[in-house]
Image (spheres, helix red, strand yellow):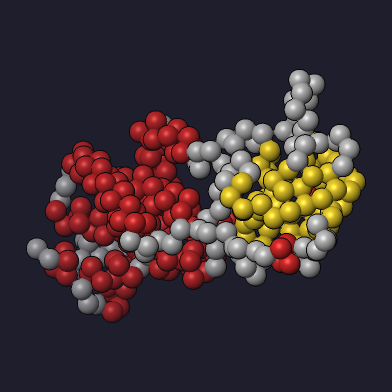
Amino acid sequence: MGWGQTYGTQREARPTWTPDDLSAAAALGGAQLPAAGLLWWICSTTTQEDYGAGTGGALGALCFLLFAPLLLPILGVLSAFALTLPSVVLARLSGRRLGGPGWVRHVVAPVVPALFWGALTGPLFGWSLGTSVPVVAALGLLPTLWVGLARRRGWRQWGVWLRAVLGSVVLFLLAFGGGVLATETGLIQEYEPPKLTPAQLAGVWHGPSGAELRLRPDGSAEAVKLPTEPPFDDHHVEDYVVCEGSGTWEPNEDSGNDGRAGVLLELDGDCGEDTHWSITGTEGAPRLFVLFGDPDSGTLRILKPAES
């Protein structure tokens, strides 16, 4: 029995969903999330700046996996109502008017709710519609097809969930292998900070709370409300101290606590210690940053060029 035969009957073509449809949508909607989360983590940690953070979100991922048996069914139900079931209904309605293979309609249908949710979620992650819509549509693709397959095969609910659990393991392994392969072959480009010359580093850099760092071409520097490394004694427990005054600076290659090129700043007086500001951003929009304190839970401070 093919897709066209199954969705051509009056019962299957109803533009509604049944409890079995909801169960199937929730099962695979939740089952695919570990693989999707793994791919997102691989891409984000590879292509984006981690600012010297120690675990890169690995601890949060571990906590998610520990609570996955409780979270995934709930998240699956939410994704079913928000994305999968509307896609199923659209596919069935389009079948009445357009005809054609059922699997094609179920592949295309998730794009419609993805346009809505992509427009809402895109700004949360700083994504354009060209990124958010394909991502959301991809999350709705397999569950939408899964609902049709479950109906076509006549699986019982326990069979649907058992197959979804096994499918979750397979998808996770495929995502892991594919992510590693894409990283090693360069398909996913690893982030590299820009290489700035001393002339490009010289200038005025601004930060939050009125912080300002002025780097002059002659190697002199001036700071206003600038966070720096705290003095090395037992009386200071802060991640950083705020200093101002004059001093010197020099380009520093492959140094600092993150092993990256940047600027070594030494201010006169005893307010704080020498501070290594690492280079990040892009060639067109460079940044300087320091992660003060514990790499896993420290305080991040970023400076931008005055013209930004």
Q: Residue at x 53, y 38 (%)?
A: 54
Q: Residue at x 38, y 47 (%)?
A: 38
User: Residue 23 in the image: x percent, y percent?
Assistant: 30, 45
Q: Is residue 44 above or below residue 13?
A: above
Q: Is residue 173 above or below residue 3?
A: above
Can the viewer see residue 211 in this picture? Answer: no
- Which residue appears farthest toward the front when viewing the image? 218
Which of the pair 124/200 is nearer the observer? Answer: 200
Q: Residue at x 40, y 68 (%)?
A: 111
Quadrant containing the C terminus is bottom right
- Figure quadrant of residue 30: top left
Which of the pair 56/124 is nearer the observer? Answer: 56
User: Residue 284 in the image: x percent, y percent?
Assistant: 65, 70
Quadrant containing the N terminus is bottom left
Q: Is residue 223 above or below residue 196?
A: above
Q: Is 284 on the left or on the right of 104, as rendered?
A: right
- Which residue appears farthest toward the left when viewing the image? 1
Q: Is residue 154 above or below residue 293?
A: below
Can the viewer see residue 103 in this picture? Answer: yes
Badge count? 0
- Figure quadrant of residue 292: top right
Q: Is 224 on the left or on the right of 41, as rendered?
A: right
Q: Is 1 on the left or on the right of 98, as rendered?
A: left
- Which residue appears farthest toward the bottom when viewing the image? 98
User: Residue 33 in the image: x percent, y percent?
Assistant: 37, 47
Which of the pair 52/3 is nearer the observer? Answer: 52
User: Residue 134 in the image: x percent, y percent?
Assistant: 42, 66
